[in-house]
Amino acid sequence: MGQVYRTGRNLMACGGASSRMTMADTSPTHEGLLDERLHRLGAWARGRRSAKVTEWPAKDQTTSVRATVVSLCERGLVIEERHRALGLFPVRRYPEADGTVERELRDRLERVVLHGTNPDDRTSSLIALLDGARLHGTAFPGVPRREVEPRMAAIAEGQWAADGVRRAIREMQATMAAVTAATIAACT
C-alpha cells in the first residue's frame, strides 16, 4: 500500500478506527505487480458495501505473497529452490540471489535512523511500517531498541502507514484474544 500511496492513488478515507477504503484512480502505474494488486484491490473494494482498510491485507495475504515472490524471482533478487523433506514433503525456499539490494537498504536505514540523515518518502514509509509492526530488532539486529525506537517513532509520526499497521495489529491481537478466550471457555 505504500507503493500505491506514493503513486498518488487515493485509497482510503480515514474515519477513525473504521477507516473505509476507496479507489479514486485506477490508471496504470506501469509496474506489473503494482498494477495487478491495484486491479484486485479496486475490484474487491467495489464489490463490498463497506471495505475496511484492515480487511484487505488479511483477505489478500496468500495471493499477494505469491505475486510478490514471483516478481522477486523475475527480477533476479531471489531464486526458487525446490526439494523434498524426508523424501516426501515438497519444500520451497527462496534464498537471496543478490545481496546488494538488502545491503543498500540496510545502509540507507542505518544512515537515516542511526546517523540522522533526512529520509526520502520511500524510506519514511518503510520506517513507518517497521515501527508500526514493532520490527526494530529485525531492522537493526544487535542495536538496542532504545537507541532506534525514538528516531523511528519520530519519522513515523504523521505517516498513514504506521497508524494503519498499528490498528491492523491491534485488531488481529483482539481477535486472537477473543478466540483464545472462547476456546478456553468451551474446554472448561
Image (tube, helix red, strand yellow):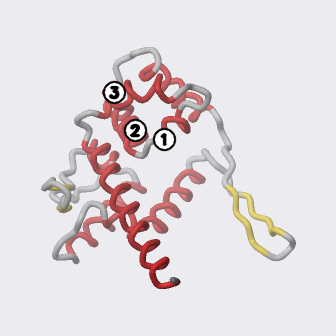
Decide if residue 32 is on the left or right side of residue 15: right
Q: Which residue is mark 3?
A: 120
Q: Are marks 2 and 1 in contact (CB under 8 Å)?
A: yes
Earlier-in-chain disc, 3 versus 2: 3
Q: Which residue is mark 1?
A: 135
Is disc 1 placed on a helix, strand or loop?
Answer: loop
Which of discs 1 and 3 lies nearer the camera? The answer is 1
Categorize mark 1 by other alpha carbons within 10 Å: few (<14), some (14-19), many (20+): some
Image quadrant where residue 168 sits: bottom left
- Residue 8 drawn at (x, y percent): 21, 45
**What amino acid is found at the position of numbered circle 2 in the picture?**
Asp
Decide if residue 73 is on the left or right side of residue 46: right
Residues 113 and 97: in front is 113
Is disc 2 placed on a helix, strand or loop?
Answer: helix
Cα separation, mark 2 vs mark 1, equals 6 Å
Q: Which residue is mark 2?
A: 131
- Residue 79 drawn at (x, y percent): 67, 52
Earlier-in-chain disc, 1 versus 3: 3
Residues 134 and 12: in front is 134
Residue farthest to the front, as pictured: 188
